[in-house]
Image (cartoon, rainbow, N blue to C red):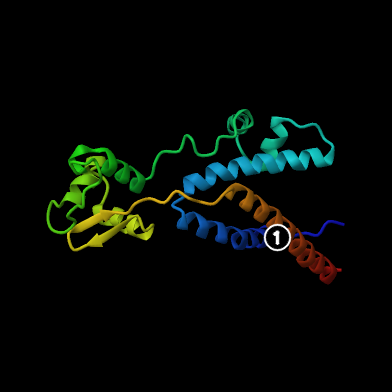
Amino acid sequence: MAVFIPQQLKARCLEFLIFPLARYCVRHALTLQDFLAVTKICFVKAAEEEIRKSGEKLNTSRICIITGMYRNEVNKILKSETVLAEQPLGPGARVLTQWSKNPDFLTKGGKPRVLSFKGENNEFQQLVHSVSRHLTPGTVLFELERMQLVERTPRGLRMKESIDYVGDNPEKGFELLSNDINSLISAVEENVFDRQKVSNV
């Protein structure tokens, strides 16, 4: 007999699972939109896996009913598994791009200048507003400092040199982590929910 698990309890358990992922996203400047784009792909893959395990015929309608996603979303994912290619740059990245390419904010040697960031109409404010008048310079500065992409110096605000090295094969490392997490979740799920089933008998 299948054990009944209240929807509210399942949602609370899901919150515990997602919170570490939210921390990862915040640390690496991945937005909610980025997270949702990847999550939709994972939902489709998980639904495909579940349907195949059951021996049933795989089709878009069954994936839609399992995931709660619209048919056009599912079809788009089935045709292409591109994750973030269509996602626009965030405000911080757009400001850094402008800082790196706009001659108004470069040295004669073509490198990002140290910019003033205090007082009215300072250079950093001009930079931010050259990207969008709707952006708040203080908020953008907070995000860039949080990501350790800029630093305050006696001369002004300096863009740090980026470090692109991320190891020989970061995807493989996280794939192994994913497998370990999946096994751990299955073990905990079986232990917790089976115990609940026994207590309800």
Q: Residue at x 61, y 63 (%)?
A: 16
In the image, residue 27 sits, relative to residue 81, either above or below, namely: below
Query: Residue 94's x, y, as percent?
Result: 33, 42
Secondary structure beneath label 1: loop
Horizontally, residue 198 falls left or right of residue 153, namely right
Left or right: residue 147 compared with residue 61 = left
Q: Is residue 169 left or right of residue 113?
A: right
Depth check, front residue: 109 or 146: 109
Pick the quarter of the image with the C terminus. bottom right
Q: Position of residue 6 (x, y in %)?
A: 70, 60
Q: Nearer the viewer, residue 1 or 92?
A: 92
Q: Amino acid at mark 1?
A: Pro
Which residue carries the number 1 mark? Answer: 6
**Residue 149 coordinates in the image, percent (x, y):** 35, 55
Residue at position x 57%, y 50% in the image: 170
Can you tell which quarter of the image residue 154 is in?
A: bottom left
**Residue 104 drawn above or below residue 151:** above
